[in-house]
Image (cartoon, grey):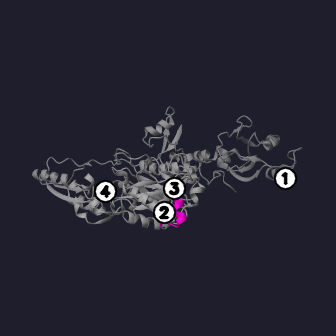
Amino acid sequence: MTAVTAGGRGGYGRAVQLPDGLVAVVKRDCPTCVLVEPVLRRLGAAVWCQDDAGWFDGDDTELELSYRLGIETVPTLLRVVDGAETARVVGWSREQWAELTGVADLGEGLPEHRPGCGSLSVDPFRIDALEARYGGTGLVSRRIELAELEDEHEALFDRGWTDGLPVVPPTPERVLRMLRGTTRDPGEVVAVVPPDLVECTVEKVAVNAVMAGCLPEHLPVVLAALEAAAAEEFALHGLLATTYFAGPVVVVNGPVAARIGMNGGVNALGQGNRANATIGRALQLVVRNVGGGRPGEVDRATLGNPGKFTFCFAEREHDSPFPPLAADRGVPGDAVTVFAGSGVQPVVDQLSRDPASLARTFAACLRVNAHPKLPMAFDAMLVVSPEHGRVFREAGWDRARLLAELEELLTLPGAELVRGAGGMAEGVPAGLAGAELPKFRPGGLLVAHAGGDAGLFSAIVGGWVAGQTGSAPVTREVRA
Amino acid sequence: MRTVLDPTGERQAAAREPLPRPASLRGRSVGLLDISKARGDVVLDRLAELLAADGAVVRRYRKPTFARTAPVDLRHEIAEQCEVVIEALAD
């Protein structure tokens, strides 16, 4: 026996008071329901209709009864005893209807059997709204009712929840749909988010992912990016608070990137791809909304950079001269790497066709990272384009080889770097004049592969304060 | 009526009164935390002089890097040893 107070989807919600006897749910748009109309009237069943309030006495155009009863097909005929469902048949079957009702010779002239139609309450376009309205959603975020006269987009701006661009209103049904993108419990704490050190649940990430414009399949990548960004060595609080330009840059590796439609090709670092744009944005909205990190408050950036709206791309793996970035960092397969990045500096070399020459170009451009006279102070990420990458691939240079060459080329004479050298006050203390200083700390230069087929250009994404005193890149697995 | 879910950390404002401001710093322990920014010591040295001239007992602290929050132990040490905090930020 099935208690009717237990709704169709998990037994949540208020009780539905059903009259004892025969109860049916129908849809006028369903030919089978139209076929059985005379039978239902003869039986004197209490009938609720999903799409026409006037067809029978019962009006279920709000679909609440259908949802709570777990109706999947119309017509559905129930027998109810003492308010509880004791039997159910779906569609039309003379034999089954006779058995349930105890009335023989039902439906004279009708075929023996006719399948029913889909219930509106399981329509994919309605189910999220019904679950949000009638289901026990399990969502615990505070619900905020917008006033009738409020424009919903302006209302979200007014509450300080956006990054300056419009956001998608995080309605309960949208958040429920977003949560279907992960198998993780909505209440699981993903990270403690600075600056307010707030425990951030999967649900809160989903709310912000909705606002950012994510699809449910993007959510696992957002969750992984947040886990990575919240790792102690990434120093997210300092990255947010700094007067420097930097913000989190997310590089995605593994089959997940293609599966969710990410771009590692043409315009990989630019606009126009929903997954790239919204995953990076969702991470920043979590920092803003959950962590409380807002520009002009804890975020003290002098200038910032446009990547602080969003900066996320996939590595172009299929023809890369290098193993996937995350795999080289110990996490093969689906993974994200977060890097404290400060914007894009172009590297042009249209003439080098051998790797040694191209490496020297990279070194010359990398040397100016932050300042040509500041060694070991700032990390960087070199994004090698396919046309540049081909030079290394054909010469058999992998990432380690390129990094080794760059390290040698970027070991700088202290005399050129000391304060005052070159007529510039900036630089290292005079006592280091006799030293040889590496431009990058060990591990302070990341190399990735991305971009469109054409263009002998690569990119340097300048970093932030390096390593122990600042931020170290972090790689984390993307879990379903 | 449209309903949206609150995207924030939903932090409740702490309902507690701050301690009354002391009328004078004479004899009070005042902590100065150097966040390890270049030349921060210059301004803190001068502040220490001025506070000492007002009769305050100045204690000096330093965090390992300006890029990260102060270690928990250091925060506790300051809370244990100081009576007055001067909160300010400059760069």
1 and 4 marks in contact (CB < 8 Å): no
Residue type, label 4: Lys
Which residue matches tag 3?
Answer: A385
- Residue A136 seen in this snapshot: no
Vertical order, A407 against B30 (above or below): below
Membership of A179 in magenta stretch: no
Task: Write down the chain letter for disc 4.
Answer: A
Please, what is the dominant secondary structure of the magenta stretch? helix
The circle on residue A95 is 1
Q: Pick out the residue farthest to the right.
A: A109
Residue A366 position in % (x across, y down): 40, 57
| For marks 3 and 1 on the same chain, the one whose residue lies earlier in the sequence | 1
Q: Is residue A14 left or right of residue B84?
A: right
| For marks 4 and 3 on the same chain, the one whose residue lies earlier in the sequence | 4
Task: Write down the chain letter for disc 3.
Answer: A
Which residue matches tag 4?
Answer: A373
Task: Find numbered disc 4 in the image and state the secondary structure of the residue it sits on.
Answer: loop
Magenta span: A385-400
Residue A81 position in % (x across, y down): 71, 51
Q: Is residue A450 left or right of residue B47?
A: right
Residue type, label 1: Glu
Q: Of the residues tagged 3 and 1, which is closer to the observer?
A: 3
The circle on residue A355 is 2
The crowding category of the residue bearing disc 2, from other C-alpha atoms within 10 Å (few below 14, some 14 to 19, many at least 20), is: many
Task: Find numbered disc 2 in the image and state the secondary structure of the residue it sits on.
Answer: helix
Residue in front for this viewpoint, B59 or A97: B59
2 and 1 marks in contact (CB < 8 Å): no
The circle on residue A430 is none
Q: Is residue A4 left or right of residue A469?
A: right
